[in-house]
Amino acid sequence: MEFKPLVFSGVQPTGNLHLGNYLGAIQRFVALQDSHDCLYCVVDMHAITVWQDPADLKRQIREVTAAFIASGIDPTKHIVFNQSQVSGHAELAWVFNCVARLGWLNRMTQFKEKAGKDRENASVGLYAYPSLMAADILLYRATHVPVGEDQKQHLELTRDIAQKFNNDFGPSIAANGLGEAFFPLPEPLIGGPAARVMSLRDGAKKMSKSDPSDLSRINLTDDADLIASKIRKAKTDPEPLPSEAEGLKGRPEAENLVGIYAALGAVAKEEVLTQFGGGQFSTFKAALVDLAVAKLGPIGAEMQRLVAEPDHIDAILRDGAARARVLADATMANVRDIVGFVR
């Protein structure tokens, strides 16, 4: 069965958005809108799988929305909304809780990492959130999802849930005139070489909003002076930059900074090394400062402007949610018929 190509992706509104979120996700969202119809969602229901301060959560939902728009996502051509305004996400997640198997959720490595040793004290929501993620995507029958390596397992689960739903309810899907399969099996759109941005203080750790050191990350709201200062203070090693990519092996900090330059400049790492290989880190860092300030400075400034206008952001989210609801309601009407609910 042919499904209309559609991209869905979401970003959690939990604290500072940083360079890793921008290069790993938001920059790709901007590029995809030229070739696909897209839904970009602030997944606020996922955020509350761990307790959030309500005032902070509101601010962070608006901040993520501001980051989308400041980065170049067009909310008039595509749909930008927050998940909690479309009730179909929660309703379909319950149906999928009844389709997914415990064994499947027990294999999810991210729950084990996030729950840590105190698994008994984790919320049911944190455990079951892959079902909600599947509902987020399949509520719009999306065919493609831009994902980082850490979300590939959840997308595979989404495909398993879609497949099992299609198999379990095959006769009902056909009887309702909906063809052989109701849900597509969404394909991952895997990021380029810069999908993993590491900490500026430790090249072995991912850049993270939860790192206690603010020097470990470049926040999207940082101004030009702060961006420059953090790059200058970024950890490096005493050797000059190599001229070949092979020479970056065993040098995680050097590899990270070269990867950041390549991603911001939309060039291959090899090109960066051809230009700066053999030279001192100080020269390369100065060039990286110029590039990062030129690319990220305007985004930060526009984010600050947008965040100061919460009514404008809320209007964008309301409009996006109304448009998302049209698609979601059509899916849910069919799902209720397929499952056998009376309506």
Image: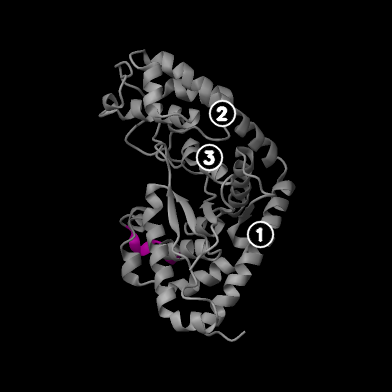
Residue on which disc 3 sits: 27
For this view, does 323 lie left or right of residue 183?
right
Residue 80: tell me if it is visible: yes
Q: Is residue 121 magenta?
A: yes
The number of callouts visible is 3
Residue range of the region highlighted in magenta in the rendering: 118-125
Tell me, yes or no, whether the two marked residues, 2 and 1, touch with CB atoms within 8 Å: no
**Coordinates of residue 196 in the picture (x, y in percent):** 39, 39
User: What residue is drawn where x is 63% and y is 61%?
Assistant: 324
Residue on which disc 2 sits: 295
User: What residue is drawn where x is 47% and y is 22%?
Assistant: 288
Question: Mark 3 Cα within 10 Å, few/some/many (few <14, many 20+)?
Answer: some
Label 2, secondary structure: give it.
helix
The image quadrant of residue 202 is top left
Q: Is residue 113 magenta?
A: no
Residue on which disc 1 sits: 321
Q: Mark 1 belongs to which amino acid?
A: Ala
Between 38 and 149, the residue placed more toward the observer is 38
Between 202 and 171, the residue placed more toward the observer is 171
